[in-house]
Amino acid sequence: MSMHYGRKDLERALRLGAPLLMLDFLDVDKEAGRASGLKVSSIGESHFAGHFPGQPVLPGVLQTAGMVQASQVLFNEMFPGEGDAVLLGLKRVKFRSPVMPGMMVKVECELKGENDDGTVEFNVKNTCDDGKLASSGSVVLGRRTDWYEPYDTTGSNPVSESVAAAATFWDSVAVMKVLPHRHPFLFIDRSYGLDDPTNVIGFKNVAGSEMYVAATEQAEFAGFMQIEAGAQLGCAALLNQPAMQGKLGFFMSIDDAVFHRPVLAGSRIWEKVSCEQKGTFGIATGQFYVGSELVTEAQIKFAIVEKTN
């Protein structure tokens, strides 16, 4: 028997709200290990104002948010227990077709299997109402009773210690000269070394008043949003290169991501990204620290394209 989760049911089950909740409803069949839901997109949603002005596209990481949220609801139905259902990994998440304002996206989630380490993996895909596959990938979840326990958020780390050697410094205003991202979807506060895409450094202060942080019960900067911050940093470094200036970067894939600790309001998340350009594509690896703790690791790809306007 399928269980129906309306919008308010999802808010209670996932303990989060707008603008981060990327499902409008979800039907769950725990016996079959499947869930199916819907996300409708509207120009009235805040993220379209910053991604991108004049060329609005639903951010890939928010498509990923819908994948994760559908998986979490299905996980909680199938694997009840103590602790939080937390995102521990993403695998082979590919963004295939853009989602524009006015589209409706069907979200389909299916249990892939249980791993030897006790985590559970789900395959998820997002399909637009024009029949095109928007995105797909695998979500790795686990149940943790100690996920939100405090840890050292003030200690030094290899990323912050290497700032002194960086040749250049840009604040967020300077970054906006090469990136089209704007509020509320710009996630770089400071960047260093954008002249060298192989070793670019930056940080984001996680403010509890930010809408994507305040939307969560724990005032958390979600793992997929951290990846967006790292992607923006790497993309800015590539777009700063003379041959790439005036172009636009589009997220293509999250090849692999591992999340070790949560990033909560009041934290400063340091990012080190190394980019390699292959034709019109950028391949990047990133390590993310809060204090002395390695919180996230990721490998991503993005495409560099000509602007259409």
Image: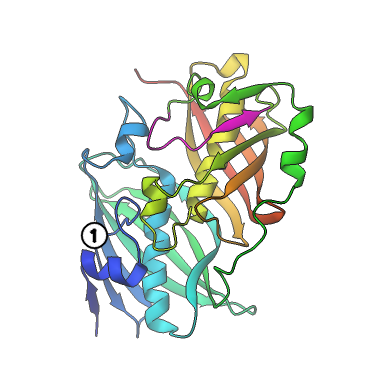
Q: Which residue is mark 1?
A: 24
Does residue 32 lie above or below 298 as drawn? below
* 10 Å crowding of disc 1: few (<14), some (14-19), many (20+): some
Q: Main secondary structure of the magenta part?
A: loop
Residue located 54% across and 49% down the image = 254
Q: How many tags in the picture?
A: 1
In this rendered view, identify the residue nearer to me: 172 or 38: 172
Does residue 240 lie above or below 189 as drawn? above
Amino acid carrying label 1: it is: Asp
Q: Is residue 240 left or right of residue 6?
A: right
In this rendered view, identify the residue nearer to me: 211 or 177: 211
Q: Quadrant of the C terminus?
A: top left
Does residue 49 lie above or below 112 as drawn? above
Q: Quadrant of the N terminus?
A: bottom left
- Location of residue 98 in the rendering, given as x and y in whole percent from the top left corner: 35, 40
Residue located 59% across and 31% down the image = 190
Q: Can I make out residue 21 in this image?
A: yes
Residue located 49% across and 84% down the image = 82
Q: Is residue 281 left or right of residue 285?
A: left
Q: What residue span does the magenta drawing correspond to?
A: 181-192
SS class, disc 1 = loop
Q: Quadrant of residue 171?
A: top right
- Location of residue 274 in the rendering, given as x and y in whole percent from the top left corner: 69, 37
Q: Is residue 184 magenta?
A: yes
Q: Can I make out residue 253 in this image?
A: no
Q: Quadrant of residue 65?
A: bottom left
Q: Is residue 1 left or right of residue 21?
A: left
Q: Is residue 7 magenta?
A: no
- Location of residue 138 in the rendering, given as x and y in whole percent from the top left corner: 50, 62
